[in-house]
Image (cartoon, helix red, strand yellow):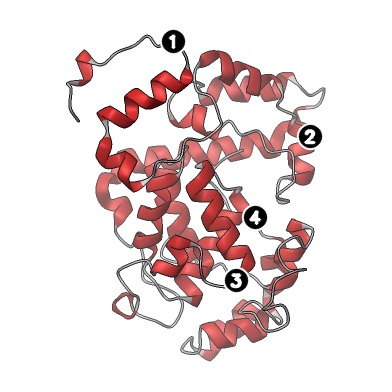
């Protein structure tokens, strides 16, 4: 930084002048990621977004990439909106409290992550539990592969998510789950590498929600790993990534949950495999908790 925070300018002729000034003041950050998200900050923009919140549609469509998510996570991340304020707004938009239950429940997960963060601090960067994948932590790579970071894996969905993350500073929560599962379980990379990558680019990047959600996917903060198959991805993306993918029919995500589990977790004890297989239908419907609370 070339100037003390207390000396930084507060008034600008327009948004482009602000962007130019920030690039000048933070050249190292700009060198890492020079993309500027379209989402506008500030209280006025936050209130406008809050006014568009539809808790009932959110509950019905939240898992789909085209669903009615609120995009309030960045405003919550920086305290422009409070959890209580958003909760009250959600409740005020429905005639029955249960119609806002799903949305309010997600706010509760954000609050939980924050309270846990306050308790364990930097412990959010440490495995809370052992991996439940049949692999030890030292069998995972320390660094994120370049093809994932650059969006050149050849998997249309993964590469699209990588570009969206870097260019917009945002990913739908379901896309975050799929990306995290791919990084940890298919490429066998430590979740910490993926968590750092997300925090580098996410506009709403919150260490608590981000890291503990990565741990949830990895199984170091859950009773089993989260993973997916192509049918799951197609269902919630309307097939937009798969229909033109040159790897369709041969990609890493083809097959049943049982088949994929056997391929990516070959060292899991048989009893763990049976227990997981018994819950495979639930996994298909399971929703990740707490990574972007929208």
What's the distance in space between the residues labelled 3 and 2, CA to CA? 34 Å
Closer to us: 258 or 36:
36
Q: Residues within 10 Å of mark 4 (few under 14, many from 20)?
A: some
Circle nearer the N terminus (3, 2): 2
**Rendered residue at 41%/40% (across/down):** 206
| Res 187 → quadrant | bottom left
Q: Which residue is mark 4?
A: 287
- Give the left or right position of residue 256, taking residue 266 as reference: right
Q: Residues within 10 Å of mark 1 (few under 14, many from 20)?
A: few
Q: Which residue is mark 1?
A: 13
Circle nearer the N terminus (1, 4): 1
**Rendered residue at 66%/36% (across/down):** 103
Q: Is residue 259 above or below residue 85?
A: below
Q: Which residue is mark 2?
A: 56
Q: Is residue 230 above or below residue 4?
A: below
**Rendered residue at 41%/65% (across/down):** 220
Q: Given this view, does label 1 or label 2 mark the residue nearer the observer?
A: 1
Circle nearer the N terminus (2, 4): 2
The percent position of residue 266, horizontal first and vertical second, equals 50, 89
What's the distance in space between the residues labelled 1 and 2, CA to CA? 40 Å
Q: Which residue is mark 3?
A: 155
């Amino acid at each position: 930084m070339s100037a003390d925070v207390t000396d930084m300018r507060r008034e600008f002729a327009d948004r482009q002048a602000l962007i130019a000034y920030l690039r000048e003041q933070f050249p190292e950050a700009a060198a890492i990621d020079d993309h500027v998200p379209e989402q506008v900050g500030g209280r006025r923009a936050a209130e406008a977004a809050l006014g568009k919140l539809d808790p009932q549609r959110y509950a019905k469509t939240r898992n789909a990439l085209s669903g009615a998510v609120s995009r309030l996570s960045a405003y919550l991340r920086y305290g422009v909106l409070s959890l209580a304020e958003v909760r009250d707004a959600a409740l005020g938009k429905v005639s029955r409290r249960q119609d806002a239950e799903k949305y309010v429940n997600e706010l509760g997960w954000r609050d939980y992550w924050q309270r846990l963060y306050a308790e364990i601090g930097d412990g959010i960067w440490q495995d809370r539990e052992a991996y439940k994948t049949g692999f030890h932590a030292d069998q995972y790579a320390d660094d994120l592969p370049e093809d994932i970071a650059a969006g050149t894996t050849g998997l249309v969905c993964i590469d699209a998510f990588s570009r969206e993350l870097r260019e917009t500073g945002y990913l739908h929560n379901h896309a975050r789950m799929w990306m995290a599962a791919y990084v940890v379980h298919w490429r066998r990379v430590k979740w910490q590498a993926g968590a750092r990558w997300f925090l580098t680019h996410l506009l709403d990047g919150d260490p608590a929600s981000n890291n503990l959600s990565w741990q949830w996917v990895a199984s170091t903060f859950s009773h089993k790993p989260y993973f997916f198959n192509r049918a799951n991805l197609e269902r919630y993306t309307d097939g937009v990534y798969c229909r033109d993918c040159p790897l369709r029919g041969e990609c890493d995500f083809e097959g049943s949950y049982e088949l994929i589990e056997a391929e990516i977790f070959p060292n899991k004890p048989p009893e763990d495999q049976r227990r997981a297989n018994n819950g495979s239908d639930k996994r298909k419907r399971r929703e990740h908790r707490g990574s972007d609370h929208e």
